[in-house]
Amino acid sequence: MKKPATPVEPLPNVLIEPIVRAALAEDLGRAGDITTNAIIPASQRARGRIVALRAGRIAGIGAAGLAFTLLDQSIRFEIEAPNGAEVAAGETIAVVEGPARALLTGERVALNFLGQLSGVATATARLVKLCEGTKARVTCTRKTTPGLRAMEKHAVRCGGGFNHRFGLDDAILIKDNHIAAAGSVANAITRARAHHGHMTKIEIEVDSLAQLEEALSLKADTILLDNMPPERLREAVKLTAGRATLEASGNVSEKTIAAIAATGVDYISSGAITHSPKCLDVALDLEDGALT
Amino acid sequence: MKKPATPVEPLPNVLIEPIVRAALAEDLGRAGDITTNAIIPASQRARGRIVALRAGRIAGIGAAGLAFTLLDQSIRFEIEAPNGAEVAAGETIAVVEGPARALLTGERVALNFLGQLSGVATATARLVKLCEGTKARVTCTRKTTPGLRAMEKHAVRCGGGFNHRFGLDDAILIKDNHIAAAGSVANAITRARAHHGHMTKIEIEVDSLAQLEEALSLKADTILLDNMPPERLREAVKLTAGRATLEASGNVSEKTIAAIAATGVDYISSGAITHSPKCLDVALDLEDGALT
Amino acid sequence: MKKPATPVEPLPNVLIEPIVRAALAEDLGRAGDITTNAIIPASQRARGRIVALRAGRIAGIGAAGLAFTLLDQSIRFEIEAPNGAEVAAGETIAVVEGPARALLTGERVALNFLGQLSGVATATARLVKLCEGTKARVTCTRKTTPGLRAMEKHAVRCGGGFNHRFGLDDAILIKDNHIAAAGSVANAITRARAHHGHMTKIEIEVDSLAQLEEALSLKADTILLDNMPPERLREAVKLTAGRATLEASGNVSEKTIAAIAATGVDYISSGAITHSPKCLDVALDLEDGALT
Amino acid sequence: MKKPATPVEPLPNVLIEPIVRAALAEDLGRAGDITTNAIIPASQRARGRIVALRAGRIAGIGAAGLAFTLLDQSIRFEIEAPNGAEVAAGETIAVVEGPARALLTGERVALNFLGQLSGVATATARLVKLCEGTKARVTCTRKTTPGLRAMEKHAVRCGGGFNHRFGLDDAILIKDNHIAAAGSVANAITRARAHHGHMTKIEIEVDSLAQLEEALSLKADTILLDNMPPERLREAVKLTAGRATLEASGNVSEKTIAAIAATGVDYISSGAITHSPKCLDVALDLEDGALT
Amino acid sequence: MKKPATPVEPLPNVLIEPIVRAALAEDLGRAGDITTNAIIPASQRARGRIVALRAGRIAGIGAAGLAFTLLDQSIRFEIEAPNGAEVAAGETIAVVEGPARALLTGERVALNFLGQLSGVATATARLVKLCEGTKARVTCTRKTTPGLRAMEKHAVRCGGGFNHRFGLDDAILIKDNHIAAAGSVANAITRARAHHGHMTKIEIEVDSLAQLEEALSLKADTILLDNMPPERLREAVKLTAGRATLEASGNVSEKTIAAIAATGVDYISSGAITHSPKCLDVALDLEDGALT
Amino acid sequence: MKKPATPVEPLPNVLIEPIVRAALAEDLGRAGDITTNAIIPASQRARGRIVALRAGRIAGIGAAGLAFTLLDQSIRFEIEAPNGAEVAAGETIAVVEGPARALLTGERVALNFLGQLSGVATATARLVKLCEGTKARVTCTRKTTPGLRAMEKHAVRCGGGFNHRFGLDDAILIKDNHIAAAGSVANAITRARAHHGHMTKIEIEVDSLAQLEEALSLKADTILLDNMPPERLREAVKLTAGRATLEASGNVSEKTIAAIAATGVDYISSGAITHSPKCLDVALDLEDGALT
C-alpha cells in the first residue's frame, strides 16, 4: 500500500454527515435490519477487515467510517489506507470492531460509498499515470451523480486529478450555444466580463484556431479545445504560447490520453471518470469465528 | 424506437421531486448559471431535442423532465421515448421548448439523471436479453448509489429486470455470517420466522447441497446459491424440484449469464447493473439558429 | 415488572433521532421553556422517576430517553422497564437525573412518546393474551399516525404482535377494488406476479370460499378473510388445509378476538391497536425536595 | 350534516403540506403502490365518496385533500363536510375523482389524517356539548401526538374547543415544581414577570385556596385548579370573583365534565381529547363499476 | 467587562444547531476551505482570542461556539464574556484553541453570528440605558431577519429588552386594517375574544383617545399607541390609569426614546434594533507565532 | 423610478423558495395569523401597493412576491420596480391583490425580505455612485447574514456592485495567517497552485510593496491591499502596472471611497454593505375602504 505524498484533505463532516445519514435511512427503511436483529444477539461483538478485492485508489473512507459510527458510536473504525492511498488486491483498507449487529447493518452502506468513490479515484489515477512526464493535469466535469458531486469531485482529487468548476455558479464556461447567442467569441467574453467580477475565471470553448486567436486577444483565462485531434491541439498550444490555460476535452480515454497529453495542453477533462467508473470491489471480512 | 409492451409505472413525483430539487441546488450553487445569465437575454426562447448518442434502454425520463420544469414551469417537455423504451443511436428521446436560459441551465442535471439511469436500464436489458428462452429473471442487489436507490431500482424495472429487496427492512436475507452466528441453517430460519410475520419473505444463502436440503425442509421462500458453477446450480435445481425459488449470484456478467440461466434457476442477481453501469450517452441538441 | 423473554430489538437511532428532534422543536417553539428558564436556576439539579400510573406494556423508551439527552447530553437516563416489559401501576419505568431545567423542559415530549407508544403496545398485548393457546398471531395495519409508522409498528412488536407490511411498497395486498379492475382473483394475482419478483409476498382479500379456492389454486402467499364470522373462518381454515397463510380482519376487538383465534386462522389484524389506543398514563415524579 | 355557524379557519398550506408530503413518503416507501401499479391500468379513472361510518365532527379535511392532490394535481377533491361540520353515520364528507391509481394510492394517508383528526374534533365536541348552558370553555393540553400538534390543536378548534398554549414558549405555566423551586407562589410569579413581557400570559397551578389568594393578589392572568372536586372549585370561583380566569383540570371525562362546568370555572382542560381519542371511522367508497 | 446580574438563559441547542449547520454549509460550499487546506498542515494547532473591536453587548456566543465545535469536536471554546455581558473595546470575548485548519475555517461563520447578534443586543442596550429611571421597558417587533427570529429575539433579551410576540400565532395584535374590517374597536376585540382562549394576550392599536377608551372598556390587555407625540402619550397614560399595559411605537430612536419613556408608558417598541443594527465589530486574533 | 439599463437576472426560484417557506413557517408558527383569521372574513378581498417610504435601490422583489403566492396561489403580485430599480420616496414598488387574509398574513415576511435586501442594494448603490468616473468596482465580502448569503450577494448585484467569492470553496484568498504558516508569499501561492486547478482564482493579501512584488512575480490573479492609505494604494497601482487585479479593503465608507477609487485600484470591497445596511423602509398600503 502506498499512501499519498501529501495527505488529501478530508471533506468536512458537516457536509458529508447528512449524505451518509440519508444513505443509512434509505437502507434501514422503516424497520431496520430485520434479519440481523432476529438472528444475532445484541451482546455479540465482532471484528473485521475491509479489504480491496482488486487494486485501486482509495476515496470515501470518511463516509465509510461514518456509516458505522452513526449507527453506533462505540464502533472503532481504524483506517489503514487513507484517501488517496494506492492499494493492491487483498490489502486491508480499514479495521472495524464493535457490536456485531451494527457491523452487519452498516456494512453495505459503508461499502457502497467506499466502492463507488474509490472507483472514481481509481479511474482518475489511471489517467493521471498515463499523463506522467507531461505537464497535463487530469480534471473532471459536471457529469457527476446527482447528490454526490462534492464527494465525487473529492474522489477525483484522491486520484491525483484536479477539479473543474463545482457548479454553474463558481466559474464561467462559455460554450457554443452561448457564442451563437452572443454573435461572436468577443461579444460573449465581453458580456461575461461586464457582469462578473475579479474572482471568477472565464473559460471559453473554441472550435477553430481563428476563435482561439479571438479568445486570446480578449484574455480569456482558459480555453477549451473540444474534440480536436492531437495535431490540432499541438498547433493551438504553439499559437497560444502560454497566454492562456488550455484544456482539451472530448474522446478522452485510457487509449487516447497519452497522445493528448503529449501535445502540451495544460488540462485534460474526462466525464467518464465520474459518470461511468467501475466500482472498486471491496468487502468486509469478519474474523473467523467472530460470530459463532 | 420500441416502446415497452406494458408501460413501466412511473415513480411517484412526491418521491423524486425532492431528489431532483437537491440535484438542481447542487448544480446552481449560490448564484445560479452565471454564464448563461450574463450572455443569453431573458426573453430568448429555444427548442431542442434530447437524443441518444448510442443505443440503449431509457429510464429516468421523469426526473429529466422535472429538472427543466422545476426551473421554469412554462417549459414544455414532450416525451418521445418513455421509460422502458429501446432507442437506437441518434433517436430523439424528448423534445424540450421554453426560455433559452432555463433550457441551458437545466440541461446538465436533466442529462445526468437520464444518462445514469438509462445506463442502469441498458445494462439490465442486456442481461435480460441473454436470458431469453429460459425462465430466469434478472434481479438487482443493494449495491446502489447512495441516495438514488429507488430510482436505480426503478431503472432496473425499465430494463426488464425485477427488484430484489429495497433495503434491510423489507425482506429477510440470511447470509453466511448469520448462519455462523445461529449455528445452523435451521436455527437461523427458525429465529427469523419467530420474529417476523406473514408478509416478509425469507431468503437464505447456502453454499452446499446439504445446506440447500436443510433450507428446503424449513420451507425457506427463496434460496440464494452464491458463486456456484453451472453444473452445481443444475443439481440444485433438480434437488429443489420447485419447492422454493432459486436465485443464483456471483460472477454474473454478459459472458456468463446465458449459461447460468440455462441451469433452470428462477432469478439471477447482478450488482454490476447498478454499481458499475456505463452511462448512456445522451445530449441536448438545440435547433439550428435557435439562439442566434 | 416482567421483562420480555427475548429483548425487543431497538429501532436504530438514525431513524428515530430526527423524529424526536422535530418533536422537541415543536414544543420548544421559538423561545424554549420560558417558564422554567425564568424560575429555575441554571445550576439546579434534579432526579426523578418515570412511573406508570396504570398497568401496561412499555414501548418508546428509546425516544423518551432521547427527548432528554438531545436537550442535554449530561442527563443520565436509566431504563428499568425496557421496551416490551410488562409494568404494574406504580412501577418505575426509568430514572432520570441531571440539570433541573432540562428535565422539566424535556418531560412532556418524553412522556408523549412513551405514553402513546406504550398505549399501542398495551393494546396489542391485550389482544395477544386473548389469543393464547391458539396459533393465531396478532398483526397490525397501515392505519397508523402520520409520521410515526415505524415507531408504532415497533410498538406492536413490543406488545408481542407481528408487523404487517410497512407501506404500499413492501408487499402486495390485492383488495376488492383491484379484483374488480382485474376482472377476477386469478387475473389480479397473475398481473401482480408478472410485475413483481421473488422477495415480495402476495396477499389477496377474498369474500367467498369460491374466491378462496381460486386464490389457493394460484398459490397466493396469504389470504385475507375480511369480515367473516367465526364459522365461515373455520370452513376457510379447513378448506385451505395449510396451503396458504390465513389472515382474519374486520370486527376485531377484545370481545371478539378469542373466538376468531379459535377458528385456526394464522393472523388476526387490528387497526384499532394503532389508530385508537388508549395512551398509557405515565408521569415524571421528581424526588421530594429535589427543587427546593 | 350541520356546518359550523362560523367556518373554522384553515391551517395554512405552507404548514401542513410538509407533514402530508412526509406521510405520503412514509407510505409510498421506495417503490410506491406496487399492487395498484401492477393491476390497475394508468388510464383508468374512478370516482368515490369519502363517507363517515359513524357520526362525528370533521377535522383534517385539508390534509386529506392534499394527500390526493400532492399525488396527482388533476384529482378533483370536493368538500361536502368542511372542518367543524357535524356528520351523521353514512353521510358523505367529500367526493373525489381522478386517475384510479392515484385514488387508491392516496386513500389510506388521506383517511388516516381525516380519521385521526376528526377523532380529536369529535371527542372535543362531546365535551363541549356537555358544557352547554354554562360559561365553561373546553381547552386542550400539550399531550399531543409528536409532529401533529398544530393539526391536533386545530382539530380541537374544529370541535368547538379553545386552544391552550402551543408549546413551552408562548405562555407561562407555573407548576408545582416551579413553585417548590421558587419557594412560594409569589416568588414564582415575580420571577416570571421580571423575565417576560407584556404579550405573555401567566398561569399558575395552585392546590389550595391560600395559594389561590396569593396568586390573585399578584394578578396572575389565569389560575389552574388541578384535581379539585366540584365543591372546592365552586369555592374558588366565589373567592376569585372574576379577578382572574380559572381553569379546572384533572379527572375530566364525559362523566365528570358537566358537574365541573356547573361550578362556574372559565375553562376545563382535557388531555384525553388529543392523547386518546377514538379515531372517527371513515372510508372511501368507489362508485359501483368504477374500476371494472 | 460586566456580566449580567442574572445570566441570560441560553437558546436550546436543539433549536440553534440546525441554523449553525446551515450557515457552515453555506460557507463551506461543495469543497470546504480550499485555501486553508492547501496551505496549512493538518497537524498544525492554533490558539486565539475573539476580541471586541468596539464596546458593546454580547449575544450569539452559543452559536459562535457551535460554529467551531460542529467543525471539529476537539476545539476548546472558552467563553469569557457570556451573553448579556458588556464589553469594552479590546476585551476578550472568548478563547478558542484547536486544529488550526478548523479555527480558520470556522472563523467567519462564528464572527458573523457573534457580530450580528451582538449588534442587536448593543442597539437594544443603548435604548434600555436611555430609559433608566422610568418604568418603560424596551421591546422588539417582527421586523427581524428571515430565518433568525428566535436568535434575534434572544439577542434583544441579552440587551436587556423584552420580547414582543414571536410570530403571528402567539398573541393577538389588532391593527388599523383589522379595525376597519371589523367596523369598530369593540367589534374587533369581541371577535378576537370569541375565537381565542385564555392563554392569548390581546393588544390593539389605537389612534385616538376615544379609541383608547373603547379598548379599555373592553379590557384589552395591551394598547398600542402608534406615532403619538409625548404629550399625547402622557394623556393616554393618565386616562388609562393602570387599566391596561401601554406600548408606544413609531419614531423611536436614541434621540427620542428618553422623552417617550418619561411619559409613563410601559413598553416602547423598536423595529430598528433588529432590522438595522450596526454589526458589532469582532475579530479572531491568533496568537503571535501560532501558525509559523 | 429608474429601471436598470440591463435587467438584473433573478435568483432561481428553486434556491429562494425554501428560504421563503422557512420564513413563512417562522412567522406563522403553529397556528397561523390568529388575529386576521378571527377578524377578517375568509371571503374578503383586498388590494394594496407596496411603497418605498424613502428613496433606495430595489432587491428581493422575487422573495417578496413568493411570500404572498406561497400563502395563496391566487394572489396577483405585479412588480412595478424590478430588482435593480432606483425608487424615490413614495413610489410604488409592487401592487398586490387577492384574499385579504393572505395579504395581511404575508405582509411582514414580504416586507422583511424586501426591506433588508433593498437595504443592501441601496448601500451598495451609494458606494457605486461615489466611484463614478473611476474604473473601481464595488465588491462585497463573506460578512453576510447566516442563511441569506445568496440573496445578499444578489442584492449587491442589484446595487450595481460585483460579487466576491461566495464561500470558502470557490476561490482562494490567502490571508496573513496563511502567509505566516507558509513562511512567505511565494510559498503560500505555490502551495495553493499545487493543489488547485485552472478554474480557481488566487487572491493574496499583502501588507507591503515588497510582498506585492513577490505576489506579482508569482502571477497571483488578484492582490488584496488591506488598510492602505490612498497614497500607498497609488504606488501599488503604479508598481503593478496591470499585471494583476488590485482590490482595496479596510476603512471603506461613504466618506472614504471616492479617494480610494481615485487611486486606480480595480475593486473596493466593503463588509458594511451586507453586515450593517440600513433596512429600506417599505410598507404595504391597502386601498382606502378595501377592508370596510
Image (cartoon, coloured by chain):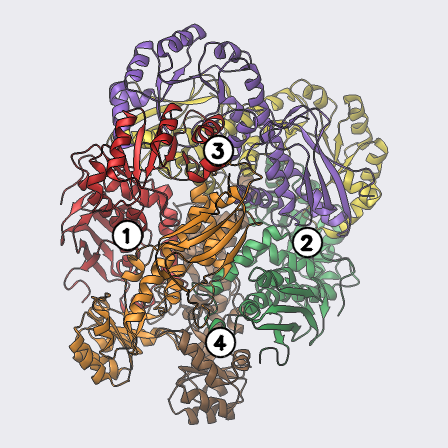
Chain colours: A green, B brown, C orange, D red, E purple, F yellow
Identified by mark 1, the residue type is Gln
Real-space Cα separation, disc 4 to disc 2, in angstroms: 56 Å
* Secondary structure beneath label 2: strand
Residue pointed to by mark 3: D183
Using the image, tell me which numbered label, if any, was put on residue A39: 4
Residue A18 place in picture, x, y as percent: 54, 54
Real-space Cα separation, disc 1 to disc 3, in angstroms: 42 Å
Categorize mark 4 by other alpha carbons within 10 Å: few (<14), some (14-19), many (20+): many
Real-space Cα separation, disc 4 to disc 3, in angstroms: 55 Å
Specify whether C103 is left or right of C198.
right
Residue F180 higher or lower than B57, as above or below: above
Q: Nearer the viewer, residue E157 or B205?
A: E157
Q: Quadrant of residue D286?
A: bottom left
| Mark 4 or 3: the one toward you | 3
Residue B53 higher or lower than F115, as above or below: below
Specify whether F134 is left or right of E203.
right
| Mark 3 or 2: the one toward you | 3
Residue pointed to by mark 2: A247
Categorize mark 3 by other alpha carbons within 10 Å: few (<14), some (14-19), many (20+): few
Real-space Cα separation, disc 2 to disc 1, in angstroms: 62 Å
* Secondary structure beneath label 1: helix
Specify whether D77 is left or right of B173.
left
Q: Nearer the viewer, residue D288 or A242?
A: D288
Real-space Cα separation, disc 4 to disc 1, in angstroms: 36 Å
Residue pointed to by mark 1: D116
| Mark 1 or 3: the one toward you | 3
Residue A216 visible (yes or no): no
Residue F267 place in picture, x, y as percent: 69, 30
